[in-house]
Image: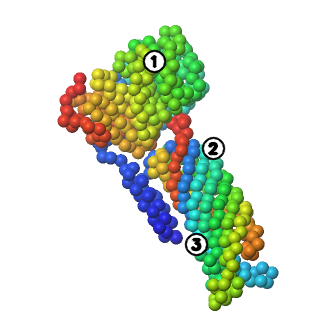
Amino acid sequence: MKHLYSIILLFSVISFSSAKGKYKETNFFTESKFIYDVCLSKNGKVIICTDNNTIKAFSVENKKLIESYTGGHRNKVLCVAISPDSSMLASGGSDSTVVIWDFNTHAVVNRIDFAKGKITSIKFSPDNQFILFGCSNSQAYLCNIKEQRKVHEFKDQQLDVTSVAFTSDGSMIAIAGGDKIIRLYSSVNYELKSELKGHTNWIRTIGFYNQDKNLISGGDDKKIIQWNLSKHESKKTSTHEDWVLCIDFDNSLFNKTNSYVFGTMNGSVIINFSLGVYKAKLNSPISKVIFLPNETGMIEIAVATLGSGLKYVDAVSMQAIMYNPLKEVRGKKYK
Amino acid sequence: MKRIILISILCVLGIKGYCQLLEDKTNVYFGYQNGFYLGNELFNSNGTISPSFYSNLKSNNGLTIKYLTNQTPNLGLGFKLGFLTSTNWQSSNYISYNGSSSSSIKLQPVFQMHTKSNKNGLYNCMKLYGEISPVFEFSMISIRNNLFDIIETEKKYNTFSINNLFYGLEVGVGCEYAFTNKIGAYIDMSMQEGFINAPLFLDSNFTLLGFNIGVRINLSKVKRFNY
């Protein structure tokens, strides 16, 4: 009997220890609680997310639904991207189809359905001419949007492609996934330029930053690695509490301060910037996290979760886990 | 016992679980087992009435370790290692095996059918399951065989030890609840039918009704959890 009471007590301790902290959050109203991807319009006023078989656009300001993009997919949408000029949306899903939408008229512009695997990651080229997407069958494709044709097929990956990226000038393409290698290609001749090896498990997210001099990556080995692309080597590695599923670098606000936010499998959202480290704990794995632009200089983020929907979180109310005089500088502009 | 189980269920259900991607690939379970042997106190063997050995063992406690890998969203395969100690032999009319005990080690291949994890709703954090497993049991039985079945001579006895290897079958139903992606809890009920052939008592089989409670630790997750 004593053993039973001890076990019951243990359950209670586990439960209370996992209770989330208090921080200011607001939910965007979505049909599904499983949001796989989210992106932001060029002016930062519209946030776009996946929601079952549809895409939804919300106002960042009042969190209200602006528009639903429906009828493009037969199965759940897994990834979404907006063109740099905010004229087009691209979405990929479990139905192995990529759909290009007109952002303003919400009409389907093009449908790409030659891929065999599920579409796991999608990006527009900076010149709005091409779309790059990766699939669960280890293939990645570059397509010309206007000409509606496949330009190149990247076949070097051994396992699922989980993340793709363009440099800001569009000269280079990065592809990463389950085979633990980040491959860098020239977007002119599609030649493999470099292979970045350092992760010991699946890579989940990659992104260029610091005027494309660096690349940041995170994965199932719980590591975030910052790479020096001129030397093709890792510059800094940090290890975290669970799989790192997403990272966002804020190039506009914190470019000089090397700041980023990332989300983990166990629901932690951590903002790491020069003034300290802030953490929020949600109940669900974090599929995507992005910085929201804020004119007052306060840090706000949008968090897409697998189970708790899409949330807006005010970073000031998050738990500081390192010295952080953020409240003292609240209101100051970082620009 | 019923009260404890009820309290445990209420405790587990009252705790807010994490939204799960329950298609965990491998899990390990550590549990505590309590139970009792079913059956009559006495049995009649060709006109000879004698007390049952197993049915009168009143205190049965044990520990279990289970390793399970999910092969499909509904099917898990693995094995279970169990340690059970049974003591406190009591019979209202006999003292034949007073002070006897049985310690056993069980190895069981486990076939588990469970509810598929849903993205939302009750089955998001909770999993109901049914298990069936053949049992290979190594039993170390210490029998204090009293020379006379009368109270006055209770202190005159011999102690025999026998080691016995036998087999059986166990079925069980249970419920698993996930607190986080890493840690969960389970509670289940199992019934084991054992077939024995021991020289020092007449029982040829026994039925053990067990109640198990424990924790689940996730060792690895399915990589393609999100598509």
Q: Judge left or right: residue B142 versus residue B9.
A: right
Residue B111 seen in this snapshot: yes
Q: Which residue is mark 2?
A: B71
Q: Sequence-wise, which precedes: disc 2 or disc 3?
A: 3
Calculate the distance from the C-alpha at mark 1 to the C-alpha at mark 3.
66 Å
Please tell me how many numbered marks the rendered image carries: 3
Q: Position of residue A31 (x, y in %)?
A: 43, 40
Q: Nearer the viewer, mark 2 or mark 1?
A: 1
Q: Amino acid at mark 1?
A: His
- Pointer 2 and pointer 1: residues touching (CB < 8 Å)? no
What residue did someone put label 1 on?
A: A232
Q: Amino acid at mark 2?
A: Gln
Q: Position of residue A118 (x, y in %)?
A: 55, 29
Which chain contains the residue that carries disc 3? Answer: B
Residue at image position (71%, 66%) is B163
Q: Amino acid at mark 3?
A: Ser
